[in-house]
Amino acid sequence: MINGKCIIRSHAGLTSFSLKGFPLRHGFFARSGGKSVAPYTSLNTAYITKDPDASSNRELLFHTLGIDRQAVRILNPCHGDRMFFEEASEPQRLTTEVLIQTDAAFTRRPDTHFLISTADCIPAVFTDDALSFAGMVHLGWRNLVTDFTEKVIRALQENYGVSPASLRIGVGPLIYPCCYVFKEPVQKEDPFWQPFLRDCGDGNYGIDLASAFRAQLMCCGVLNEKIAESGICTACENKVFFSCYKEGYISGRFPTLLSFQGI
């Protein structure tokens, strides 16, 4: 069920969900309103895909939001730990740039936008109390267990000098343990995951990605009250968002967009 933690907006046929209280312009976009046909129906914006209409969907999204002539950084994640930092003092890069095999990207340059496409993994948007930077992070169970969260927080301290307690983080739609259930999962034997497994009986366990991410953030010094979470399960709401778990890997990926500019 779609809860009341998000503001729902319509953009000429596209629908976005944005977190109440998160201070930067952002949106987690529903799968409707795009050009793709099954099994990618319809706003599939994945960069690596066999869908011939994915690039047209990205163009449609950028045009609809009026950012088609501005700097857009497209993350192409790989469940790894590669990060991208862009300083305001750097020369302006290409209008649209793809960050291959990059799971986190940050900027201090105004009028810069980030796009990532997911379908169960965590899309997280970052800034701080002073709104001194903007960034986006992709997390799945693989890079959660390799301490990617801690690496991101440490890199933000080193590159931008921001303290963990000043960070503000928004977590978009992802798969929750109500649906992310496996029979005797490999995570069952991993000490890291054991606090975040929900015993569903008969050897089935639900994996709680969101709680694992929140716990890691708080261990790094991020304040619980500064972590906003949509609470929307992509598998429960599969008619609204893509879900690889529900549909199979050959499915679309919905876009998350973050803008470092005026609200």
Image (cartoon, helix red, strand yellow):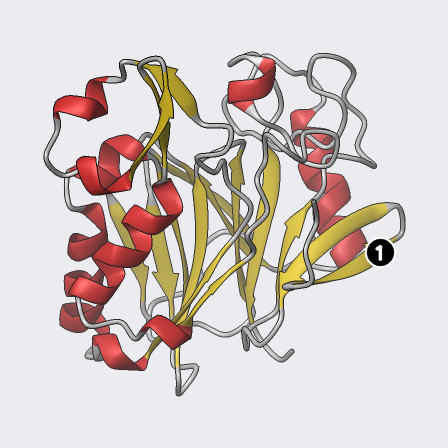
Asked whether residue 80 is in view, the answer is no
The residue lying at 70 percent from left, 44 percent from top is 1
Q: In the picture, residue 247 is in which quadrant? A: top right
Q: Residue furthest bottom?
A: 130
Which residue is disc 1 drawn over?
Answer: 10
43 relative to 73 in the view: left or right? right
Q: Residue furthest front?
A: 201
In what quadrant of the picture does the C terminus appear?
bottom right
Give me the residue at 42% from left, 23% from top. Answer: 181
Counting other residues with Cα less than 10 Å from the Cα at mark 1, is it few (<14), some (14-19), or many (20 or more)?
few
Asked if residue 175 lies left or right of residue 9, the reply is left
Residue 234, percent across and down? 59, 35
Give amino acid for label 1: Ser
Residue 240 in the image: above or below residue 131: above
Identify the secondary structure beneath mark 1.
strand
The answer to which of 176 and 198 lies nearer the viewer is 198
Residue 207 lies, in percent from the top left, at 35, 32
Residue 161's x, y, as percent?
Answer: 19, 79
Q: How many marks?
A: 1
Q: Report x, y in % for residue 34.
A: 79, 32
Find residue 219 and report its image quarter: bottom left
Any part of residue 247 in sight: yes
- Compared with 72, 218 (above or below) is below
